Amino acid sequence: QVQLVESGGGLVQPGGSLRLSCAASGSIRSINVMGWYLQAPGKQRELVATINSGGSTNYADSVKGRFIISRDNAKNTAYLQMNSLKPEDTAVYYCNVGLTRRGGGYSNYWGQGTQVTVSS
């Protein structure tokens, strides 16, 4: 079994910052890619940012220069530092992890989601 626990969402004013965390635990041999996705009301889930085991990152154009994704491999944890937040960033943010389980086999897991609301 693998669990993903997200934290760090909340209400913030435009221009403010938030830091999301996603901790993976359980039967994990190695983690390949960790990423964040968002889903706004009535819209499809979309990519925010990903980071692979080598530290290479990928960002959606809408967040480049404002958001930073990072990971702590020793803690199996990914972070999303969100700066200069805008009302249009309001969404539920989901962590996604691709990993190899201890018993073998590669699987993809989603976190439970954390609400981010940007409003004055």
Image (cartoon, rainbow, N blue to C red):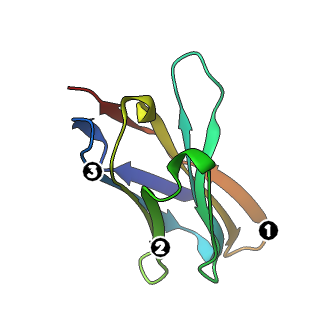
What residue sits 31% from the left and 43% below the top?
A: 9
Q: Percent position (x, y) of residue 86?
A: 37, 36
What residue sits 26% from the left and 43% below the top?
A: 15
Cα distance in 3D space between marks 1 and 3:
37 Å
- Whether 8 is drawn above or below 13: the answer is below
Relative side of 1 to 88, left or right: right
- The mark that comes first in sequence, 1 or 3, is 3
Relative side of 90 to 44, left or right: left
Q: Which residue is mark 3?
A: 17
**Three-letter amino acid code of the residue under disc 2:** Arg
Q: Which residue is mark 1?
A: 105
**Three-letter amino acid code of the residue under disc 3:** Ser
Relative side of 9 to 59, left or right: left
- The mark that comes first in sequence, 2 or 1, is 2
Q: Percent position (x, y) of residue 114?
A: 39, 39
- Out of 112 and 69, give the one closest to the viewer: 69
Tell me if mark 1 has few (under 14), some (14-19) or many (20+) residues whose alpha carbon lies within 10 angstroms of its own: few
- The mark that comes first in sequence, 2 or 3, is 3
